[in-house]
Image (cartoon, rainbow, N blue to C red):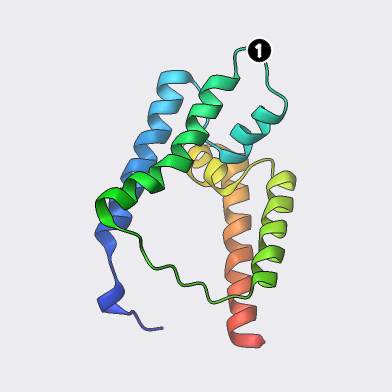
Amino acid sequence: MTVDWPAFTPWPALAGGLLVGLAVAVLVLGAGRIAGISGIVGGLLRPLAGDRAWRVAFLAGLLVSPWIFVLFAGLPRPRIDAAWSTLLVAGLLVGIGTRYGAGCTSGHGVCGLSRLSPRSAVATVAFMAAGFATVFVLRHLL
């Protein structure tokens, strides 16, 4: 394995991770809510009384924050080395896994692990292993 050192930018990744951690901590400590995206969206599909505003605000923040970033840093050039059909299948598989795993990667990997949830630890190991296996098969066997 080689590292593309000119493209290696740890500081933006560190800053993003710190911001995600801060947002998760503020939500759980301030409102007692878990910042798992699938749970937040799922709660909007069958909302409880008085439970909609914070979910809408959270999702609005997810949608608006990239536009705020663009104002200060410009639009990055995305590079996706996959066909649309591959992306569609991958998205559907992630959605199915989210339902079967009772949560998404953000819910289990960030929020669940920080709460020392055994279920989240198992889920995180499972989706990481599946990701490693998928990359190995696609890059080395096919």
x and y, in percent, of residue 119 in the image: 63, 41
Q: Is residue 59 visible?
A: yes
* Quadrant of res 103: top right
Which quarter of the image is occupied by the N terminus?
Answer: bottom left
Q: Which residue is mark 1?
A: 49
Q: Residues within 10 Å of mark 1 (few under 14, many from 20)?
A: few
Query: Closer to the camera, 112 or 37?
Result: 37
Amino acid type, residue under disc 1 in the picture: Ala
Q: In the image, is 17 to the left or to the right of 79? A: left
Residue 16 higher or lower than 10, as above or below:
above
x and y, in percent, of residue 34 in the image: 52, 30
Look at 73% across and 44% down and name the residue there.
Answer: 99
Query: Closer to the camera, 45 or 30?
Result: 45
x and y, in percent, of residue 94 in the image: 67, 55
Query: Closer to the camera, 92 or 85?
Result: 85
Residue 130 higher or lower than 73, as above or below:
below
Query: Closer to the camera, 126 or 33?
Result: 33
Which quarter of the image is occupied by the C terminus?
Answer: bottom right
Residue 142 higher or lower than 52, as above or below:
below
Q: In the image, is 6 to the left or to the right of 28? A: left
Q: Secondary structure at mark 1?
A: loop
Residue 77 higher or lower than 123, as above or below:
below
Q: Is residue 115 visible?
A: no
x and y, in percent, of residue 91 in the image: 66, 59
Look at 40% across and 48% down and name the residue there.
Answer: 66
Q: In the image, is 10 to the left or to the right of 117? A: left
Residue lying farthest to the top in this orientation:
49
Residue lying farthest to the front in this orientation:
71
